[in-house]
Image (tube, rainbow, N blue to C red):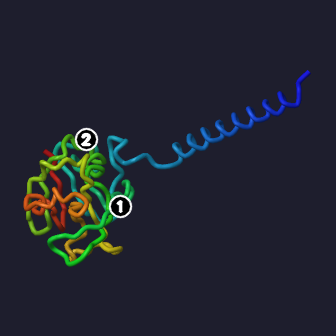
């Protein structure tokens, strides 16, 4: 015959087991329902809006021939990142939001974190020598709570967290902080 203590212990164990199973079921359901990260597949979904960024070169995830085309919605689907920093180009503290440059490269299946960055005005620089795993360099599309427009050096900018990592505030990295970025050609 079961004692009251044994029955209570069994109920607690069953309740705990149900909670664990229910939690596992919820995790499985969310995994099936929520979209996979863009970089988890060989092919990216097609851009449906205006293409803001083309990534080409040594990449394995494409959606337009041998290139990865990103519209704003696709970029916004990547993990968000943000920081506030002073820049050599604007007055005061500015808040930038976007996604990590490393996440954009991962989404395109880039084989390297080195690339040629090209801006709308044909400014081109070889981006390299920056540890993107250590430093949260942004591909920013928002500044001070507003989308960055073409007139305000957007719609995409590579931004460094100069205040958080003073060692990044060098002339070389200032040259890598490309505004009006349109192409990244991975080496």
Tell me the quadrant of the picture where the N terminus can be found: top right
Residue, disc 1: 48
Question: 38 or 5: which is nearer to us?
Answer: 5
Q: Tally the numbered discs.
A: 2
Q: The C terminus appears in which quarter of the rendering?
A: top left
Q: Position of residue 171 (x, y in %)?
A: 7, 62
Q: Position of residue 65 (x, y in %)?
A: 23, 48
Residue in the foreground of this view, choosing between 167 and 57 = 167
Q: Residue at x 22, y 76 (%)?
A: 152
Does residue 127 lie above or below 48 as drawn?
above
Q: Residues within 10 Å of mark 1 (few under 14, many from 20)?
A: few
Nearest to viewer (mark 1 / mark 2): 2
Mark 1 or 2, nearer chain start: 1
Residue at the extreme top of the image, as rendered: 1
Mark 2: few, some, or many residues within 10 Å (few <14, many ≥20)? many
The reply to whether callout 1 and callout 2 are in contact (CB within 8 Å) is no
Q: Secondary structure at mark 1?
A: loop
- The residue singled out by tag 2 in the image is 60
Mark drawn on residue 83 = none
Q: Is residue 47 left or right of residue 130?
A: right
Spatial CA distance of label 1 from label 2 is: 20 Å
Q: Quadrant of residue 86?
A: bottom left
Q: Residue furthest right?
A: 1
Pick the residue in front: 126 or 8. Answer: 8
Q: Give the SS element for disc 2.
A: loop
Query: Residue 121: x and y, percent?
Result: 10, 69
């Amino acid at each position: 015959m079961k004692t009251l203590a044994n029955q209570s212990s069994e109920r607690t164990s069953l309740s705990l087991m149900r909670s664990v199973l229910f939690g596992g079921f919820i995790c499985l359901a969310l995994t099936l329902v929520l979209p996979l990260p863009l970089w988890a597949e060989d092919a990216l979904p097609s851009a449906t809006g205006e293409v803001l960024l083309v990534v080409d070169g040594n990449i394995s995830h494409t959606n337009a021939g041998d290139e990865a085309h990103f519209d704003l919605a696709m970029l916004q689907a990547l993990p968000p990142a943000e920081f506030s920093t002073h820049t050599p180009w604007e007055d005061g503290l500015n808040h930038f939001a976007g996604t990590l440059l490393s996440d954009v490269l991962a989404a395109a299946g880039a084989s390297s974190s080195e690339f040629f960055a090209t801006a709308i005005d044909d400014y081109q620089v070889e981006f390299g020598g920056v540890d993107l795993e250590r430093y949260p360099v942004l591909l920013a599309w928002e500044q001070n709570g507003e989308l960055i427009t073409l007139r305000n050096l957007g719609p995409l900018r590579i931004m460094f967290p100069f205040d958080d990592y003073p060692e990044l505030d060098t002339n070389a990295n200032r040259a890598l902080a490309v505004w009006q970025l349109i192409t990244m050609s991975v080496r």
